[in-house]
Image (cartoon, rainbow, N blue to C red):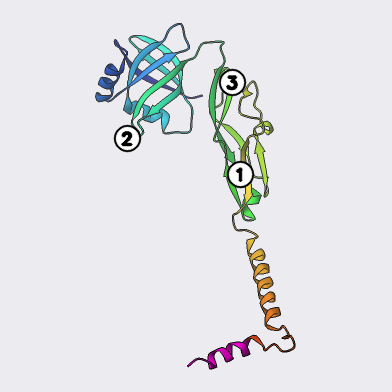
Amino acid sequence: MKTVSMSGSPRENVGKKDARKSRREGKVPCVLYGGKEQIHFSLLEKDFVKIIFTPEVYILNIGVDGNQYTAILQDIQYHPVTDSILHADFLELIPGKPVIIGVPVKFLGEPKGVLTGGKLRTKIRKLIVKGMVDDLPDYFEISIADLDLNENIKVKDFSYPNLEFLDTPSAEIVGVKTARGAGMEEEIEEEVEAVEGEEVAEEGETPKEGEAPKDAKTERGTEGKG
């Protein structure tokens, strides 16, 4: 996996007041956990651009107060209105200890089902896996060229060496569905023909003895008026 270096500033005080002060200065309150102790620090919000506005997952070398930590971004919280970053959690990577992380999926090819009018539906864009950092790829490649209409690829259909997949095995990663409205035109035409057939049958009904045709009844009704 690719590596990005970031430089943080230690937070002397931990609390809401200190967090608000950091945000006013354009910094994001952060915490690093998973090691011997939690490390509270702050990072410039602009430095997050290179690690969050991308589908890729990075290993981070974070420098805080002269110390270097290897970590991954575990969680991030955004302001509900402004979308500014409120807080970030990082997980320290310990040699020999597996990590749980979401790895992006890259689809290869154009499904033959799409070429015949189907619609590609992507359900999972990151697969959650457990494994050693050295075994993690930048992304998973999944070929979808052979997918036909109403066919899909599920988590249980995919594997990767030395990694344990934690998503539900029956969960669909990607599939090709019949496009909405496809096959409906014939059904609509059949319904129209059936309705027209009923109308023709009603118009052609022979009136019972002593009963005037419907049109005649209407004419009498109008003659009596005026």
Q: Label 1 to label 2, Cα distance in Å?
A: 38 Å
Kindly indicate the quadrant of the structure image that contains residue 208.
bottom right
Marked residue nearer the N-terminal end (1 or 2): 2
Residue under label 2, please give it.
Answer: 82
Q: Secondary structure at mark 3?
A: strand
The three-letter code of the residue at mark 2 reads Thr
Image point (71%, 79%), residue name: 201
171 above or below 32? below
Give whichever of discs 3 and 1 has the lower sequence position: 1
Q: Position of residue 84 (x, y in %)?
A: 33, 31
For label 1, the SS is: loop
**Distance between mark 3 and mark 2 Cα atoms:** 34 Å
Identify the residue position indicated by label 3 in the image. Answer: 130
Circle 1 packing at 10 Å, graded few (<14), some (14-19), many (20+), is few
Residue 35 position, x and y percent, is 47, 9
- In this rendering, is residue 190 above or below 168? below
What residue would you read off at disc 1?
109
Magenta residues, dominant SS class: helix
The mark lying in front, picked from 1 and 2, is 2
Label 2: how many residues lie within 10 Å, few (<14), some (14-19) or many (20+)? few
Residue situated in front as seen by the camera: 22 or 98: 22
The mark lying in front, picked from 3 and 1, is: 3
Mark 3 or 2 closer to N-term?
2
User: Tag 3: residue type?
Assistant: Lys
Please give the range of residues in magenta: 215-226
**Residue 147 visible within the image:** no
